Image (cartoon, grey):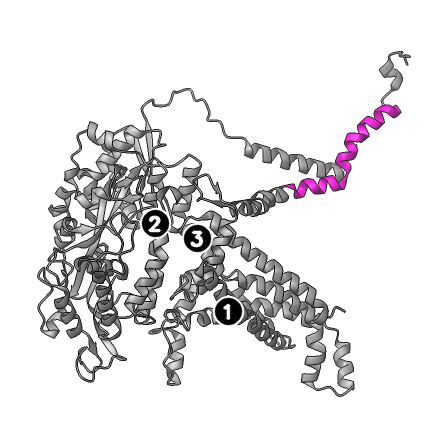
Amino acid sequence: MSIPQLTRRQFVRLSAGVAATTLMAACVPAVAPQGAGAPAAEAVELSFDMYNFDPWLKALDEMFKAYGEANPGVTATVQSAPGEEFWSRQEARLAAGNPSDLSIGDPGYFGRYAHKGYYLDLASYVERDQVDLADWFDVTVNDCRYDNTTGIVGQGALVGMPATYVGLILYYNKDLFDAAGLAYPDDTWTRDTFTEAALALTKDVAGKSSGDADFNADDIVQWGVTHNLGYGLAVHTWNNGGALISDDQTKCLLTEPATVEVFEWFGKLLHEDHANPTPAQLEGLPNPLQVGKVAMSMDGSWNVDYYVANLAFNWDIAPVPKGNKGLDRITYAGTNTLHIFKDSKHLEEAWKLLQFMTGEGGMAYFAKTGTPSLKATADSDVYLTGAPEHRAEAVNIGNYAHNYYPGLKSDQWKQIYTAELEALWFGQSDAAAVLQTICEKITPILETPVNEL
Amino acid sequence: MSTTTSAEDKRGAWSPRRRIELSRGTRLLNNEHVIGYLFVAPLILGLLVFTYGPVVAAFGLSFTKGDYISTPKWIGLDNYSALLREDLFWKSLKNTLYYVVGVVPAGMVLSLLLALAMNQKLRGIVVFRTIFFLPTITSSVAISLMWLWIYNPEFGVLNFLLKQFSIKGPAWLSSPTWAMPAVIIMAIWRGLGYNMLIYLAGLQGIPDIYYEAAEIDGAGKFAKFWHITVPLLSPTTFLLLILGMIGAFQVFEYTYVMTGGGPVYSTLTLVLHIYNNAFRNFQMGYASALAYVLFFILLGLTIIQFRLQNRWVHYE
């Protein structure tokens, strides 16, 4: 008896058939098996969208575990992605009508999402459950508001709740101050006092300070100060009575005298006094404060716990210096906001989770990642215990903070503002000319009506 | 044996009519063209859905205003007229041309010299060819990060070497003057291996008889190189010129990772400008218009090159 054999054509037809069947099977959606036992009626799964940031992921895992133990039947999980992919993934899910239940917010995306109505308006929930918004710092609650008619974040409907907040403070190296025989920064400092200290603490290889005869600007071993350029310049400007743009975000105010004065001062600090390293000089320094190359750093309070763990010298924090005009101190603060997506299928459960996250229960975990927006937690030992000595200054900024103009137009005009300012940082142009150029370029954006964006 | 009278039985299993019906269906499946198309169908479907479809969609988007999550609004040619008036568009185009002119010719000359060196019949030459080819198969992001360290003004290898010759190296990537040359140097280094390999293949395709005949006529090394090697390598050169130019116009990862387009827009290239408009400013329509302008520039340059090839490309 002969063994049946496949011809080439039969083999080809068989392969094509198998491939077609596999393809069709893969395209058919899976049907959940109908088990004998009925699924639990009350079990709810909530998803929280978060980009990869280890301190937050750790805090959220612990927080959600605690919430699940206290609320059987509700499971909250984190859906995370690397930062570069996170927002495009979230955009795609929103476009598909399949977002997570809750998400972290971001100043760059808040305005767009709120404008398109993706976030749940929490006003009715807050009113129904008698939530007292005064329990959180005002600036942080306002950072969760959005005005649909003006495109401004900071006013209008409440579409989120605050988690942690950060702001600009003054870090200083106590050892370098001691070596120079200078008093530490405190809340009496003005911009003039700050400048004097910065010059005195700028040293060349021979130990001469900026302003001394024979000071060698080509061989500086220690600078007096470094700034977070974006927020730092804004803070100095506000303390001088100026502003970058108007509060209604329709006018450029960079050419106002009070603003120009601050940028001219900073240009001098960079290129004449050499008390602040230029971006070129900073390129070789991963963190100038950490490696002892600067005596002061006007930077964000987001670094406090990192410095607690990593700085090898004596240091502390102080409030940012006031201006020279006797005005009340202002600093920058921004909030990490939490939102519920309107399309969530479990709005009530999501709201309860949000209340937990932003209440004392959740804030105990958030306190490990940054300054809690809830006053009770921020002022308690949960957050205040530990270094540095004046840790409370990181909380106090909530009382005198201004936001950095978040809104629907902010990404566009800030991109131009940041890029054009490089001409000042590199000494290619003077402050007045640069600010004039920026105003000419950003005014059309600021004047565009919100409904045309 | 019984004699049946039904129509079917009268036809029988092998009647001519039944043979034709079976063969029509069978003929289709037996047709190798059809089988071939069936096998490439998934690939073609994928290309249509994920490549050509988006290309056509982008053309449509270039006449609209909107981001990914809202319905695009038709605005006609406004995006195209806006980009012609935008300073940053011209700046990014100028930077891109600077990059192309810096990378392509120098890259090709150096890789030809490298290919000539690698074309020796020496023991272990394959090892050197592999070493020179390695950057080609390494991720451009990884290479960009590595060169960030090389260019570091305080700790970088380059400034350290320059210091040995008493030269104070600039802050490469923080200098508006030096940032683009720094990117160009890195890009030339990275492209050497690939171009070298293509030239090597071209060199090895040149018949020895030409060199032998030239030697008999008393030609020296340079004469052989200039009058034999270069003309006979012209098809390879043409290929590398086209590919190199198209690749150089699309430079993105290097400037995105190393400089972000700064300082002072000195390394803002056209594709980075497209990326910023699409994914930072959420202006998908405008970004699509920019992308199509780039497409038409490349198309025009490629057509010009193909027209000019008759003057200098010699096919055997």
Q: Is residue A367 left or right of residue B280?
A: left
Residue drawn at (18%, 78%) of the image: A211
What's the chain of the residue with tag 3?
B
Residue that label 3 marks: B277
Q: Secondary structure at mark 1?
A: helix
Tell me, yes or no, whether the two marked residues, 2 and 3, touch with CB atoms within 8 Å: no
Q: Quadrant of residue B198?
A: bottom right
Q: How many marks on residues? A: 3
For the N terminus of chain A, the image quarter is top right
Residue drawn at (18%, 43%) of the image: A364
Label 2 Cα neighbours within 10 Å, binned few <14 / some 14-19 / many ≥20: few
Mark 3 and mark 1: Cα distance apart in space: 22 Å
Q: Quadrant of residue B213?
A: bottom right
Residue drawn at (70%, 42%) of the image: B37
> Which residue type does callout 3 highlight?
Asn
Indicate which label's residue lies in the foreground, 2 or 3. Answer: 2
Magenta-highlighted residues: B14-41
> Which residue type does callout 2 highlight?
Glu
Residue A190, position as x, y percentages in the image? 12, 63
What's the chain of the residue with tag 1?
B
Q: Is any part of residue A2 visible from this angle?
A: no
Residue that label 1 marks: B98
Residue that label 2 marks: A447
Residue B264, position as x, y percentages in the image? 38, 66
Q: Secondary structure at mark 2?
A: helix
Q: Is residue B29 left or right of residue A45?
A: right
Q: Quadrant of residue B233?
A: bottom right
Residue B183, position as x, y percentages in the image? 46, 68
